Amino acid sequence: MTVNGIGYWVFAALAVMAAVAVVASPSLHRAAFALAGLGGAVGFLFVVLGNELLFAFEVLVYGLAVPALIWVALDLAGARVRREDRRAGDHTGWWPFALAAACGLGALLLGVFAVSSGSWTTGSPAGDESTTRQMGELIFKTYALPFAVSAVLLLTALVGAVVTGRRDDLEEELEAAEEARRRREDRMRRRREDRERARRAQRPAAVGAADGDPEVEP
Amino acid sequence: MNVGVNHFVALSGVLFAIGGFGVVARRNLIGVLMSAQVMLSAGVLALGAFARFGYRGTHPLGGGAFALFAVVSGLAEVAVGASLLLLLHRRRDTLQADDLDDLRG
């Protein structure tokens, strides 16, 4: 059972380049763009495999939803992250060890696949026609329970994200106290300036009286 | 050249290793989260390949169903992860992994 070789090599190269850009790009915004590109490349690999449903899921989730979430997180985190963004490409000091470990892991995986390729037993291939229909039946019949569980998982995660992301009472009280302190300091500073201005205004009059103004009756 | 399941699984291994490097070596936690998504994409790709070629007696499209569940899990992971990172940034004012060493033993 074979698939389109040219499509595979083209999109495989794009996927690898996008993955390298995600882990190596100095800018997090560009890395999020690369993640979207990776989602698109993997999605088209699913087209090469003849699975349109997975293509749609991959492009919608990894090509659009996940990068959008990352961009929202980057913007909500504010200017400080954008400043850090410039040095985010700096990897940890021991990145050569991480690179060696990743190369070792990749070599191990490729070695295992190469060794086992001869004994790899594929089953009956899925036909080229109506893959989406077959997968729909499979999900809603054979895997109905995991499907329901994944739906509950997604709902729980989204509710948890909202609850975690909102400000709690303590933070609001702290911010209110900080605002009140700032307002009190402003009021005291203004009062001090008023007193200082009044003292300056009184001082010339007092100096004039001490010098003996001729207009003033004894 | 014939492209079989081995090619897809090998590509999946390469993508997984690249993502693993990012998870270990990235300094910014949002970058770590994105690298973890690369690793998850690699797993989804392998499952999609198994959905095409089948494996022994299993249903050929069983891998596709698991790939869908993996994609949903990845989305949940990103939603919760981004929310936690925002909370962390609000409390600690940093997202650099090197600055978060409170549990260093």
Image (tube, helix red, strand yellow):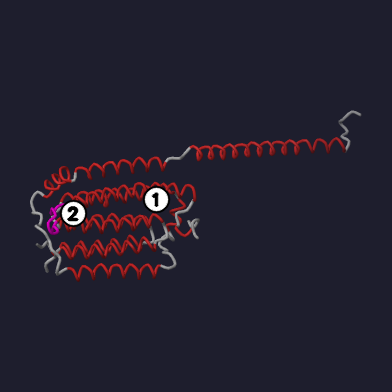
Q: Position of residue A141 (x, y in %)?
A: 15, 43
Query: Residue drawn at (16%, 52%), measured in percent from left and top?
Result: B62
Which secondary structure type mostly characterizes the magenta part of the structure? loop
Q: In this view, does A208 lie above or below A54?
A: above
Between marks 1 and 2 in the image, the one whose residue lies nearer the viewer: 2
Query: Residue drawn at (26%, 48%), measured in percent from left and top?
Result: B72
Give the Cα separation between the discs numbered 1 and 2.
Answer: 34 Å
Q: Mark 1 points at which residue?
A: A74
In the drawing, does residue A176 fall left or right of residue A73?
A: right
Give the residues drawn in magenta, as a range. Answer: B52-63
Q: Which amino acid does label 2 sit on?
A: Gly
Whether residue A30 is in magenta: the answer is no
Q: How many labels does the image show?
A: 2
In the drawing, does residue B1 fall left or right of residue A82?
A: left
Task: Give residue A45's quadrant in the image.
Answer: bottom left
Q: Quadrant of the N terminus of chain A?
A: bottom left
Q: Position of residue B84 (x, y in %)?
A: 41, 48
Q: Name the residue under label 2.
A: B63
In the drawing, does residue A181 fall left or right of residue A54?
A: right
The secondary structure type at the circle numbered 2 is: helix
Whether residue B53 is in magenta: the answer is yes
Task: Give residue A24's quadrant in the image.
Answer: bottom left
Q: Position of residue A85 (x, y in %)?
A: 42, 57
In the drawing, does residue B26 fall left or right of residue A48?
A: right
Query: Residue drawn at (16%, 55%), measured in percent from left and top?
Result: B51
Query: What is the crowding at mark 2: few (fewer than 14 residues within 10 Å), some, or many (at least 20)?
Result: many
Q: Position of residue A13 (x, y in %)?
A: 23, 65
Camera-nearest residue between A150 and A215: A150
> Label 1 lies in what chain?
A
Q: In which quarter of the image is the C terminus of chain A?
A: top right
